[in-house]
Amino acid sequence: MPISNERRWPSHIQTPRPPYYERPERSESIPARPSVREDTLESRELQIERKKFLVMLKENPRGRFLRITEYVGDRSNSIIIPAPGLRDFQKMLEEMVKADGEIPATNQLPQI
């Protein structure tokens, strides 16, 4: 998956979907997904600048997973990491923290 600031070749650019508020209602012929019972095993909240993160360890009949939800204003985005991948995710995150400490910052706003 490309990083957000990477450019893609025009042949690989997909036509953008209309925003959710302009999409037609779900057709009666397409059944909605049945809800799945999820149990929250652990939960933590973190505020960083204007963003709020909610990290939850959850479990459902398919297994355990980590859900990370980012709230910015009235929008939210979530990612889900299956429990078997948590150690790999932790290792990658530690490598990114280490890289952040080693690579000099550029285009940083002056501190007031």
Image: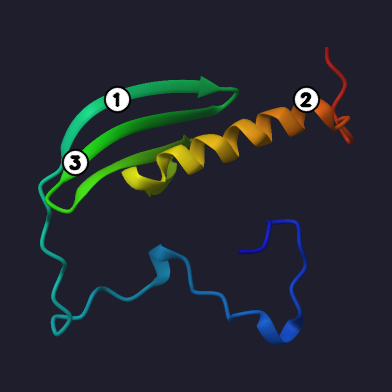
Residue position for label 3: 59
What is the secondary structure assignment of the residue under circle 1? Answer: strand
- Cα distance, mark 2 to mark 1? 28 Å
Which amino acid, mark 1? Ser
Residue position for label 1: 43
Residue position for label 2: 101
Residue shown at 23%/37% (left/top)? 58
Residue mark closest to the camera, 1 vs 3: 3
Which amino acid, mark 3? Glu
User: Height in image: 67 above or below 26?
Assistant: above
Query: Could you tell me residue 48's position as x and y percent?
Result: 56, 23
- Cα distance, mark 1 to mark 3? 12 Å
- Cα distance, mark 2 to mark 3? 34 Å
- For label 1, the crowd category at 10 Å Cα-Cα, with few meaning under 14, some 14 to 19 and many 20 or more, is few
Residue 45 versus residue 61: which sits nearer the camera?
61
Residue 74 versus residue 34: which sits nearer the camera?
34
Q: Are the residues flagged by discs 1 and 3 in contact, CB closer than 8 Å?
A: no
Quarter of the figure that contains the C terminus: top right
What is the secondary structure assignment of the residue under circle 2? Answer: helix
Left or right of residue 81: residue 98: right
Query: Could you tell me residue 79's position as x and y percent?
Result: 42, 48
Residue shown at 12%/56% (left/top)? 35
Q: Quadrant of residue 24?
A: bottom left
- For label 2, the crowd category at 10 Å Cα-Cα, with few meaning under 14, some 14 to 19 and many 20 or more, is few
What is the secondary structure assignment of the residue under circle 3? Answer: strand
**Between discs 2 and 1, the one toward the N terminus:** 1
**Between discs 1 and 3, the one toward the N terminus:** 1
Query: Could you tell me residue 89's position as x and y percent?
Result: 50, 41
Left or right of residue 19: residue 29: left
Left or right of residue 111: residue 46: left
